[in-house]
């Protein structure tokens, strides 16, 4: 049996998966002794009478020669060797970068590991990889971000180099520390809109007095991506400033770019005050508002439902497109305040009564589900009336709503109606179907 605390029982100068007498049937078998050793010594590989380099050599060999799962497991253990692991990892990395046919999986694991060592030696190595193509450059940026504050000076220096500026900004944005504010502010007017947008997005997570004016100015940026990030950043400001956020954001409900409009709707919905709601309603009522923006406005208003918003929805419904109609009906089902539920239920019930014979079956189904979700008992009879509908889907949705509304009361009412011979034939059949489905 292998002694899990003796590296000599595991080590070979050149591990090979075929050496089953040494490594067992799977590379993963070799990771377990290292894991046991680490767990027995407070999560760190010990400096004991067994040569630490030998343990490290075993772990590195597993990283180089193992399968994906073995690499995944041993990558969790290598940082516990501390700075001793950095130099050999850099050697592995440089050898793979220069190889004609690089092992991209090994490169990815090695770059990720670099970000686990809070040591100055790994920073220049990762910076050299930033401009690499594909996932390698992204992995290097993420590794630098994982290093945190120690990487900020080097990344700040990279901002002076146009070819590295975007990657440096993205790495700084991942660090999310106040020390990144100054370097990020230095690129908010960069000629490249991608860099400006990335800087604005990163700065938006800080509540520093220098940032609000930058976000407000970025609203005027000619690039839609920058305006969108500025709107997003202003929309999450929890403290009102001297400048009214509604006045700043409302004009962007009619921006030339629909993505900016949608983000403005989301931001104003988060604010949820009277001015924000009025701006949303006014834009929703405008015949010039694109459909995708109308839908986003309805969703935003559903986060801030008030009696006035419900009244606005009631007035808009008769003239709404099918898509907006569906969104409003769904929003009416989300009313949580008990004092507003009767108002929402009445709007939905009135929809059922108004020209019900010509309404689309899909609309009736959505109304039924919304009434069931609201749990308003006054919807019991209108939902039962839907059982007489000629569309089986409408009947089944009405049954589901009745069960959700008040199953006991609905069942008793259906049983009573089943004995009423004066009902129309359609309703009798609908009641019978409901009782069978129950």
Image: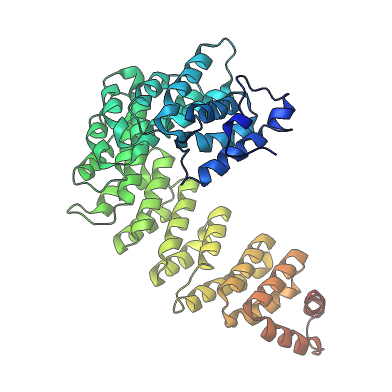
The N terminus lies in quadrant: top right
Residue sitting nearer the eye, 146 or 235: 146
In x, y percent, where is residue 126? 40, 24
Query: Which residue occupies 56% across, 53% down?
Result: 323
Q: Nearer the viewer, residue 102 or 5?
A: 5
Q: Which residue lies furthest to the front in this view?
A: 49
Residue 132 in the image, given as x and y percentages of width and height: 46, 19
Q: Which of 288 and 280 is in front in this view?
A: 280
The residue sitting at 24% across, 38% down in the picture is 179
Q: Can residue 224 be seen in this view?
A: no
Side (left or right) of 120 relative to 140: left
Outermost residue, left side: 242
Task: State whether residue 101 is above or below residue 251.
Answer: above
Camera sees residue 175: yes
Q: In which quarter of the image is residue 129?
A: top left
Q: Position of residue 45 (x, y in %)?
A: 48, 38
- Residue extending farthest top: 100
């Amino acid at each position: 049996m292998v002694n899990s605390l003796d590296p000599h029982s595991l080590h070979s100068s050149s591990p090979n998966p075929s050496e089953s007498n040494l490594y067992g049937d799977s590379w993963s078998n070799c990771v377990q002794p290292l894991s046991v050793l680490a767990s027995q010594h407070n999560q760190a590989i010990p400096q004991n009478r067994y040569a630490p380099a030998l343990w490290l050599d075993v772990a590195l060999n597993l990283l180089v020669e193992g399968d994906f799962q073995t690499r995944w497991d041993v990558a969790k253990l290598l940082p516990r060797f501390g700075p001793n692991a950095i130099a050999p990892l850099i050697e592995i990395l440089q050898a793979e970068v220069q190889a004609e046919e690089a092992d991209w999986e090994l490169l990815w694991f090695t770059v990720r590991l670099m970000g686990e060592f809070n040591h100055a030696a790994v920073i220049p190595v990762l910076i050299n990889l930033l401009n690499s193509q594909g996932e390698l450059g992204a992995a290097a940026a993420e590794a630098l971000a994982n290093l945190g504050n120690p990487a900020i000076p080097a990344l700040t220096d990279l901002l002076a180099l146009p070819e590295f500026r975007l990657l440096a900004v993205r790495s700084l944005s991942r660090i999310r520390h106040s020390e990144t504010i100054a370097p990020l502010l230095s690129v908010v007017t960069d000629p490249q809109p991608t860099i400006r947008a990335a800087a604005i997005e990163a700065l938006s997570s800080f509540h520093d007095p220098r940032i609000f004016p930058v976000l407000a100015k970025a609203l005027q940026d000619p690039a839609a991506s920058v305006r969108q990030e500025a709107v997003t950043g202003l929309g999450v400001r929890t403290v009102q400033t001297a400048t009214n956020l509604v006045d700043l954001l409302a004009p962007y409900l009619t921006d030339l770019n629909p993505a900016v409009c949608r983000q403005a709707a989301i931001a104003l919905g988060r604010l949820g005050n009277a001015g924000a709601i009025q701006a949303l309603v006014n834009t929703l009522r405008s015949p010039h508002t694109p459909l995708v923006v109308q839908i986003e406005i309805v969703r935003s208003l559903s986060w801030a439902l008030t009696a006035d918003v419900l009244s606005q929805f009631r007035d808009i419904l008769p003239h709404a497109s099918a898509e907006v109609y569906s969104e409003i009906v769904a929003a009416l089902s989300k009313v949580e305040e008990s004092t507003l539920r009767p108002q929402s239920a009445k709007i939905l019930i009135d929809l059922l009564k108004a020209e019900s014979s010509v309404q689309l079956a899909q609309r009736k189904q959505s109304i039924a589900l919304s009434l069931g979700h609201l749990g308003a008992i006054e919807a019991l009879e209108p939902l039962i009336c839907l059982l007489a509908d000629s569309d089986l889907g409408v009947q089944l949705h009405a049954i589901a709503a009745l069960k959700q509304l008040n199953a006991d009361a609905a069942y008793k009412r259906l049983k009573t109606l089943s004995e009423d011979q004066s009902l129309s034939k359609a309703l009798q059949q609908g009641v019978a179907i409901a009782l069978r489905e129950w």
